[in-house]
Amino acid sequence: MAWNPEVYDQFKEERSAPFFDLLKLVKSKTDLSVIDLGCGTGELTSKLLDYLEDSKVVGIDSSAEMLEKAAHYQTSRLHFEQRSIEDQLNLPDTFDLVISNAAIQWCSNHKELFPRIISKVKEGGQLAIQIPSNHEYIVHQLLRKVAEKAPYKTAYNSWQREYTVLKIEDYANILFENKGKEITVFEKVFPHVLENADAVFTWASGTAMIPYIEKLPDELKEEFKKEYKNELQHIFPESPVFYPFKRTFISAQF
């Protein structure tokens, strides 16, 4: 997908907070091999260097736009490679820590995907993942609502956004079935306060709206955005807007 780092970073503080909660689940050790699946702009990935002394970290992402910004954080202990998460899982490499912050939700079929991710954790290593789990919130519902209207529905040609995030008990069961220990899985609501409906639109345009827009012909893209913004303004006429953002945290030792 065509990511826009500038739009994504407009809510840097809100998007960063879950990473630091995820970091609290990571056991601080020295001299680890670490991979960050879906590293984005690399800024948060770079925080691992202080927490995991003498460790070597590689961040992978499929977005050239994101990795262009990530290059700023590259050091002798941290480097970045352009690769999708699925392509990375096809490689033989294993790591002491496999971490991912707000990226796995873009991958399909989590029941099959997670055992593959777990297979990349070395014996004695750790898995730590954070996934947005607010796909049933009204902001996402409205995207689906607009996409069902003409002329967008015809343009999508039966395509629908796939939401693959499982229930927290399903993730816990996958970890158990794959011999995970010290299993921790929970959901947390992050109480974001946004200025108004336009701010909600900007938030969504940095992530959730991207697949809807990129699959439309150019002549429909701005009209879709306009219609979606109108729907948001109808639902959120007040200022400020309270946005309860749910995220799922997953951790285990193997």
Image: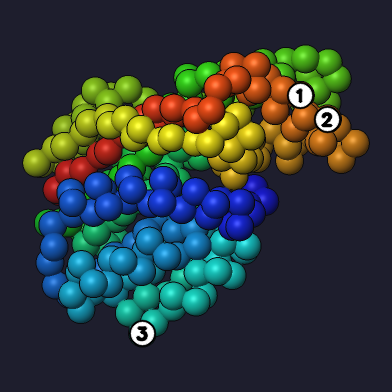
Q: Nearer the viewer, residue 247 or 181?
A: 247
Indicate the amino acid at tag 1: Glu
Q: CA distance from mark 3 to mark 1?
A: 47 Å
- Above or below, comparing residue 9 to residue 64 in the picture: above
If you read the primary sequence from the N terminus, does the residue marked by circle 3 or circle 1 appear first? Answer: 3
Residue 227 disc label: 1
- Above or below, comparing residue 136 to residue 217 in the picture: above
Secondary structure at numbered mark 2: helix
Q: Residue at x 72, y 22 (%)?
A: 230
Residue 223 disc label: 2
Is residue 41 among what the camera can see? yes
Q: Residue at x 45, y 65 (%)?
A: 42
Percent across and percent down for residue 144 are: 64, 20
Q: Residue at x 83, y 26 (%)?
A: 155
Q: Which residue is mark 3?
A: 76
- Left/right of residue 117 with respect to residue 61 in the rendered view: left
- Left/right of residue 209 with respect to residue 32 in the rendered view: right
How many neighbours does mark 3 have within 10 angstroms: few (below 14), some (14-19), or many (20 or more)?
Answer: few
Q: CA distance from mark 3 to mark 2?
A: 46 Å
Percent across and percent down for residue 55 are: 23, 74
Secondary structure at numbered mark 1: helix
Indicate the amino acid at tag 3: Ser
Percent across and percent down for residue 150 are: 83, 16
- Above or below, comparing residue 193 to residue 93 in the picture: above
Indicate the amino acid at tag 2: Glu
Q: Nearer the viewer, residue 133 or 229?
A: 229
Q: Are marks 1 and 2 in contact (CB under 8 Å)?
A: yes
Q: Nearer the viewer, residue 192 or 136?
A: 192
**Which of the colour schemes (rainbow, by chain, secondary structure, one colour) is used?**
rainbow
Q: Residue at x 64, y 48 (%)?
A: 1
Q: Are marks 3 and 2 in contact (CB under 8 Å)?
A: no
